[in-house]
Image (spheres, coloured by chain):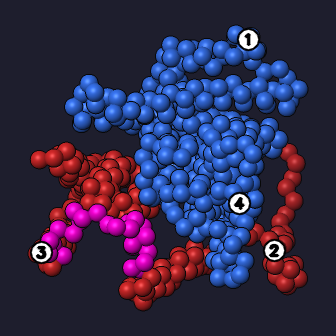
Chain colours: A red, B blue
Amino acid sequence: MIFTDYLFYLFSSILVLASLRVITANNPVYSALSLVLAFFSAAGIWLLLHAEFLAIALVLVYVGAVMVLFLFVVMMLDINIEALRQRFWSYFPVALLIALLFIFEIYLVVTDKFFSSSDPAGIPLEKSNTHSIGSVLYTDYLLPFQVAAVILLVAIISAIVLTMYGKKSHKAIDPKDQIKVNRNDRVRVVKMKSEKKK
Amino acid sequence: MQDFFSQFFSPDVALTLSYLLKIILIVVPVMISVAYLTYFERRVIGFMQSRIGPNRVGYFGLLQPIADALKLMFKEIVLPSKSNNFLFFLAPLLSIAPALAAWAVIPFDYEMALADINAGLLYVLAMTSIAVYGVIIAGWASNSKYAFLGSLRSAAQIVSYEIAMGFTLVGVLMCANSLNLGDIVIAQEGGISQWYCWPLFPLFVIYFISAVAETNRAPFDVAEGESEIVAGFHVEYSGMAFALFFLAEYANMILVSILAVIMFLGGWLSPVSFIPDGIFWLIIKVAFVLFCFLWLRATFPRYRYDQIMRLGWKVFIPLTLVWIIFVGAMMQTSYAGYFH
């Protein structure tokens, strides 16, 4: 075994342990931080496969942006673990179904042509990793790439629309409403007898 | 260096030793610069405010940073009650580690970088973006409302300004045709007129302001905000744990300044042809950018939080996008020479 093999086993064992902590940790903040560790280990494994662009993009996008926002939300939650545990068994069949589906998909990928050919990851590229990904994206996969971009654009717009929906963005009063105001809307004259002084 | 060690050790050991020595050769000057940046800051701001600043310890107060470091080392580290011990001590480490790790790819001269990797620019961006974890975890683990408010502010601010910062870097890599930091500097060869701060001037300004916001420096220091939330995320920290946050902040300042110099101000290249290139140009330029940081701090009052968010999302991000499209369009015209 050469040195990188040891590194691979180190990264993968950390990855597996961290992923286990994500689903077993009681505190959701620990779960989120374990997920960050899992992403880091996955990035390390990708680096060993000469996929430096993907590895750094994983850290940049998922660790640097997505998980920060996740942690942001998770930290502000006040979760009662006991209440969640009570409904565990009612969710269990759905979770089992998803898990089986997932295992089946992984089986399909691992046994498919991706891995049956000679090990492509072991061969260093002639050009830089970023350069080759860019040239393939904008030539062979131009159409799928643009479709993905349009889907992302739709997602951005819908996220903005969701935050705007039914919410007043400012506190200024509309002059039209001000003019229409009727005296009776605001003032109510109550007649009552005067109280006698003692 | 590796050849020198291989006279005495086996090749593997020699390689490891030479890398360790190189790491020390980078980290020690960085740490000394951090220490003297704090001194420089106090003196510069002192003079700007018609004060003298620290001048008691050693000649002109030159031993002041060392005295401060000794003081902080001997202080007790107080653990707040009901805080999360493990994360409380992990947070300072998480903030200092990325600040130092990013230095691995910084080129100081031709062929003078610890790791000359192809995606250097992305690596630096990734490292600066994970520095926010230290702040967030510190705020949460301290079990204090002020610390928590500070960390929330910092997280939102860093995430917003990172986008603008990333887009300015896209402009640079379009001009340089490379993500390697050394290649970006070499693409700016040929005197001061070839530096990217001219064709990418708006991006340069936006990068600088975003860098100030990313490092939580005044006028964007709402994460600390002494007058509103005492000291923000590190209010519960004392002694060496506090010092680590301080070191990380100043190391990040030097890092973003050196990046500004590499990407927009020609790195180690000389501005005029009759003076040779060299690492001293890099040091002079970085010192100037750092001086601008301090100048900003002494000049401007703190931004209001909603104004910070408006500036980041509604001004900087659209502006950078427009300028990237402009640069891309100009590269297809006969003026393309100005953008390479």
Find disc 1 in the rendering and name its residue.
Answer: B59
* Numbered tag placed on residue B136 in the rendering: none
Q: Amino acid at mark 2?
A: Ile
Find disc 3 in the rendering and name its residue.
Answer: A116
What stretch of residues is rendered in magenta?
A: A114-137
**Looking at the image, which residue sits at the far front?**
B274
- Category of crowding for the residue at label 2, using alpha-carbon neighbours closer than 10 angstroms: few (below 14), some (14–19), many (at least 20): few
Horizontal placement of B153 versus B91: left or right?
right
Disc 4 from disc 1: Cα separation: 41 Å
**Residue located 44% across and 74% down the image:** A134
Q: Which residue is at the front of the view, B161 or B119?
A: B119
**Residue located 57% across and 14% down the image:** B71
Residue B313's spot in the image, x, y percent? 65, 65
Disc 3 from disc 2: Cα separation: 68 Å
Find disc 2 in the rendering and name its residue.
Answer: A173
Horizontal placement of A124 versus A106: left or right?
right
Tell me the SS state at disc 1: helix
Above or below, A88 relative to A9: below
Disc 3 from disc 4: Cα separation: 50 Å
Q: Amino acid at mark 3?
A: Ser
- Which badge, 3 or 2, comes first in the chain's sequence? 3
